[in-house]
Amino acid sequence: MITRRNVFTVLLLACATQASAAVETPAGDWRTFDDHTGLERSLIRIEVNNGVLTGRVVSTIDPAEATHTCDKCDDDRHGQKLIGLQIIRGMRLDGDAWTGGSVLDPQTGSIYRGTIRLADDGQKLELRGYIGIPLFGRSQTWLRAQK
């Protein structure tokens, strides 16, 4: 027998399922831009596996950069080629942001704590890299690459 309570329960479950399905993921390819010139710089592929977000360099706009290695890196990435270099590690979803991991700046070899949030219906990625607390850091906005 269908009661008002059963109908309400079904509607509530449907809304909850719809809300959880609406959570956007940063997985995919992202176009990055130079902080100083604003020109496109590289393509980063972000993946989420078992709830952990990682990102690596797929390509660069400047063909000369494709042959560079991370000579300034102090960790296991030292000497690795820029193409294929993992620059985002270990982030996990916490509310509406991905946090808890690290972001590598391959130009300087510096490793920062990081936060990633999506904006504009998942078409923009806002990356904040910082040391200590988010107040002391810098942000970049990446654009989702069109397929």
Image (spheres, rainbow, N blue to C red):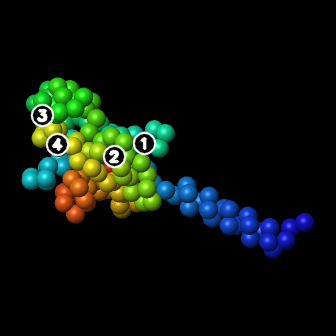
Tell me the crowding category of disc 3: few under 14, some 14 to 19, or many 20 or more residues within 10 angstroms, Cα based: some
Q: CA distance from mark 4 to mark 1?
A: 21 Å
Residue indicated by mark 2: 101
Q: Is residue 3 left or right of residue 109?
A: right
Q: Earlier in the sequence, mark 1 or mark 2?
A: 1
Q: CA distance from mark 2 to mark 3?
A: 20 Å
Residue indicated by mark 1: 52
Tell me the crowding category of disc 1: few under 14, some 14 to 19, or many 20 or more residues within 10 angstroms, Cα based: some
Q: Earlier in the sequence, mark 2 or mark 4?
A: 2
User: For the residue marked with disc 1, what is the amino acid?
Assistant: Val
Asked if 138 appears above or below 6 in the picture, the reply is above
Q: Secondary structure at mark 1?
A: strand
Are the residues flagged by discs 1 and 2 in contact, CB closer than 8 Å? yes
Q: CA distance from mark 1 to mark 3?
A: 26 Å
Q: CA distance from mark 4 to mark 3?
A: 8 Å
Are the residues flagged by discs 2 and 4 in contact, CB closer than 8 Å? no
Q: Secondary structure at mark 3?
A: loop
Asked if 41 appears above or below 137 in the picture, the reply is above
Q: Secondary structure at mark 4?
A: strand
Occupied quadrant, residue 62? top left
Occupied quadrant, residue 49? top left
Asked if 10 appears above or below 60 in the picture, the reply is below
Q: Earlier in the sequence, mark 4 or mark 3?
A: 3
Q: Earlier in the sequence, mark 1 or mark 3?
A: 1
Q: Residue at x 40, y 40 (%)?
A: 47
Q: Which mark is residue 72?
A: 3
Q: Position of residue 126 (x, y in %)?
A: 29, 56
Q: Residue at x 28, y 35 (%)?
A: 86
Tell me the crowding category of disc 4: few under 14, some 14 to 19, or many 20 or more residues within 10 angstroms, Cα based: few
